[in-house]
Image: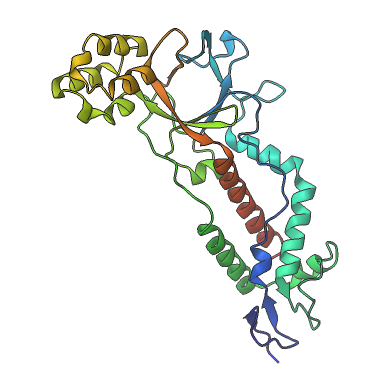
């Protein structure tokens, strides 16, 4: 009898190869992905990961972050040896450090989702033998089976993985967008800036982008003046100009616009990539972290298919 590939639930003959889709869709018990876990302020901007600089001499040029009354510089995340770490580097370290856990997860997933290798069909509820069944699979899986597994994995995660982060304009272009091939940057390509602090997630808008949202609350000529000013002026200078013209902005919008930009010497201030940013709190980082975990999980499964083809 010629082997054929069937779906779970179809009539299953001894020499058929059965793909158990539910096994492909199971959540893997993987360690937490490498981003968003640091117990410190973290900025992801144009695909680079920044933290508060350990010293001013380590700061990247023209960067400043003010938290309450203290000013700091920013630097890209570094290894213990002081080498700058791209997001790709962080991911590769993660995969290397968790190599054995990932290998076992891949072996179990591929071993459990394929039933009927050779002449004996294995119970899909029975755990895969990490040394025997997957070695057998490695020699017997066909290109056809592999392509079907890849398609099913991609279909499953297409409905689960989100790509709903905003794509802001960002700064003047001093910092180039990272094209490092990391899973994070491949998925979130075009997303400009995020800030994570105390497990809270903030979207980073330039002052111009922030003010633009309230355009209808300004008198037209005054809005144009403030909007142009936001491109190069400091936040406190913009707030001062607004305070001098409170009659030219709707009273309900006035405190929202002004105080978010600058309200006192305890105001937050971020200067990066040739511009000032306004952070907009969007809740906790939990959902973004879960989404990133799904992106990593998808890669682990796809790599597992390649490994055992």
User: Which corner quadrant of the image does residue 271 belong to?
Assistant: top left
Quarter of the picture containing the C terminus is: bottom right
Vertical side of 77 occupied by 136: above or below: below
* Residue 118 spot, x, y in % from top left: 78, 80
Residue drawn at point x = 36 percent, y = 14 percent? 235
* Residue 15 can be seen in this image: yes
User: Which corner quadrant of the image does residue 176 belong to?
Assistant: top left
* Residue 157 spot, x, y in % from top left: 55, 58
Give whichever of 249, 137 is nearer the camera: 249
Residue drawn at point x = 85 percent, y = 67 percent? 132
Query: Outermost residue, bottom direction?
Result: 1
Query: Outermost residue, front direction?
Result: 252
Residue drawn at point x = 76 percent, y = 69 percent? 137
Direction from residue 189 to residue 115 in the image, left or right:
right
Vertical side of 158 occupied by 290: above or below: above
* Residue 178 spot, x, y in % from top left: 49, 34
Vertical side of 144 occupied by 76: above or below: above
Give whichever of 112, 183 is nearer the camera: 112
User: Which corner quadrant of the image does residue 21 belong to?
Assistant: bottom right
Give whichever of 309, 149 is nearer the camera: 149
* Residue 275 can be seen in this image: no
Residue drawn at point x = 43 percent, y = 33 percent? 192
């Amino acid at each position: 009898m010629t082997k054929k590939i069937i779906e779970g639930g179809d009539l299953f003959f001894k020499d058929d190869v059965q793909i158990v889709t539910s096994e492909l869709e199971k959540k893997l018990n993987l360690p937490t992905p490498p981003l968003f876990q640091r117990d410190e302020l973290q900025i992801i901007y144009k695909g680079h990961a920044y933290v508060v600089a350990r010293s001013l001499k380590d700061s990247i040029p023209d960067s400043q972050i003010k938290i309450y009354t203290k000013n700091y510089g920013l630097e890209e995340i570094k290894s213990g040896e002081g080498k700058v770490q791209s997001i790709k580097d962080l991911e590769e370290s993660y995969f290397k450090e968790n190599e054995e856990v990932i290998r076992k997860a891949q072996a179990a997933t591929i071993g459990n989702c394929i039933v009927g290798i050779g002449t004996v069909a294995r119970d899909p509820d029975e755990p895969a033998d990490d040394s025997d069944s997957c070695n057998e699979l490695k020699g017997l899986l066909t290109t056809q089976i592999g392509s079907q597994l890849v398609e099913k994995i991609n279909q499953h995660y297409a409905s689960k993985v989100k790509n709903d982060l905003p794509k802001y304009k960002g700064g003047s272009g001093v910092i180039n967008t990272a094209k490092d091939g990391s899973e994070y940057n491949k998925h979130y390509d075009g997303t400009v800036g995020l800030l994570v602090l105390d497990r809270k997630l903030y979207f980073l808008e330039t002052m111009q982008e922030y003010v633009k949202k309230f355009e209808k609350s300004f008198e037209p000529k005054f809005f144009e003046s403030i909007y142009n000013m936001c491109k190069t002026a400091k936040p406190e200078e913009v707030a001062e100009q607004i305070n001098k013209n409170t009659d030219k902005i709707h009273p309900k919008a006035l405190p929202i616009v002004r105080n978010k930009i600058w309200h006192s010497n305890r105001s937050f201030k971020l200067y990066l990539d040739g511009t000032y940013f306004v952070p907009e709190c969007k809740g906790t980082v939990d959902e973004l972290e879960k989404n990133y975990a799904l992106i990593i999980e998808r890669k682990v499964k796809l790599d597992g298919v390649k490994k055992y083809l």
